[in-house]
Amino acid sequence: MRLMKLDGKPMRFRHYNSLRVFTIAARHNSFSAAAEELHLTKGAISHQIRLLEDELGFALFRRLPRGVALTARGQGLLNATQAAFETVESKISELRTAGRRTLTIGCSTYFASRWLSPRLMDFITTHPHIRLRVQPMIDQLALASAGIDLAIRWGSGKWRDVAIELLFACPAWPSGNAQASDAVRRLGLQGAFDTFTLLRDRDDSNAWSDWFAVAGLSFRRKPDSLIIPDPNVRVQAVIDGQGVALNDALLESELRVGALDRLCDEELADYGYFLAYPAGAVSNPDIDAFIRWMKRQV
């Protein structure tokens, strides 16, 4: 039912700031993650969502014991708002960079230093008209808000906020230092992992629980798990004995010199590196050129 003024005219919707909060919370499926991205408290996010739900007259989220999930109407609203905000952000970016051709690539420092950087000169040489900017990304989900044209994400590819395309498969497996490797030999996988501190990139990551399921081990979220968003820092933390982490074949230099060991054969076979970009981004010739170049490098 549309709200009406006393003169019979429909009242205009004015809560566009709350719509932006809703879009971010829906993208993360988490009020906590939205609060972190927007530099607000979780309570402030919850308050904004309730105000919006009151204004709209229907629920946007189902509150669950752990997190939230969109209602059917919430999903319908997300489809509309996400497309609208992406259009606005794309136009703002276009106006800001008018007359300049700068392509911003977002990726982790781990991927940039171990895979991308050794190959970049080839792209710069073959595409001298494109000015390239490599943006380190801690939050792999923040593209538009970080001004990223194209991102390279690590994981299983199960993201819904952007278009996803596999760049190359790179299974993930546990890595540890010599002491961790010795613990696996002495105690077995279950016994050793019951004692390990598990290093993760974010609080809501499911990577470890996914690996425990593949390995056939019982898993419980441990209070001493350590969150280190930067993957290169996480590698050093494993070397220093602060815990064990899920890594991949890009760790080859540490494996070769014996600084780290692969702790077992069990792995997340569907993990790898994915190209992530807003829908329609490939219509930009610079983005298309970089994607084609990346695929040739693989």
Image: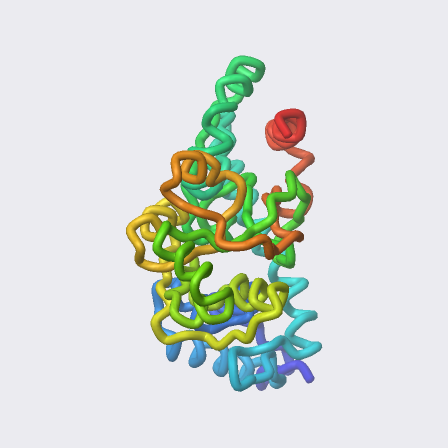
Say which residue appears at 37% left-offset and 50% top-offset: 177
Pinpoint residue 30: horizontal percent, then vertical percent: 50, 71
Pinpoint residue 275: horizontal percent, then vertical percent: 61, 42
Tally of marks: 0
Visible residue check, residue 285: no
Pinpoint residue 112: horizontal percent, then vertical percent: 45, 35
Please determine whether, in this image, residue 4 is positioned above or below residue 260.
below
**Which residue extends farthest left?**
240
Visible residue check, residue 171: yes
Task: State the quadrant of the N terminus.
Answer: bottom right
Say which residue appears at 61% left-offset and 32% top-offset: 287
**Which residue extends farthest front?**
186
Which sits in the foreground, 280 or 293?
293
Please determine whether, in this image, residue 98 is positioned above or below residue 34.
above
Please determine whether, in this image, residue 152 is positioned above or below residue 30.
above
In the figure, is residue 152 to the left or right of 72? Answer: left
Q: Which of the colour schemes (rainbow, by chain, secondary structure, one colour) is used? A: rainbow
Task: State the quadrant of the C terminus.
Answer: top right
Which sits in the foreground, 94 or 241?
241
In the figure, is residue 12 to the left or right of 225? Answer: right
Q: Quadrant of residue 276?
A: top right
Pinpoint residue 253: horizontal percent, then vertical percent: 43, 34
Say which residue appears at 49% left-offset and 54% top-offset: 263
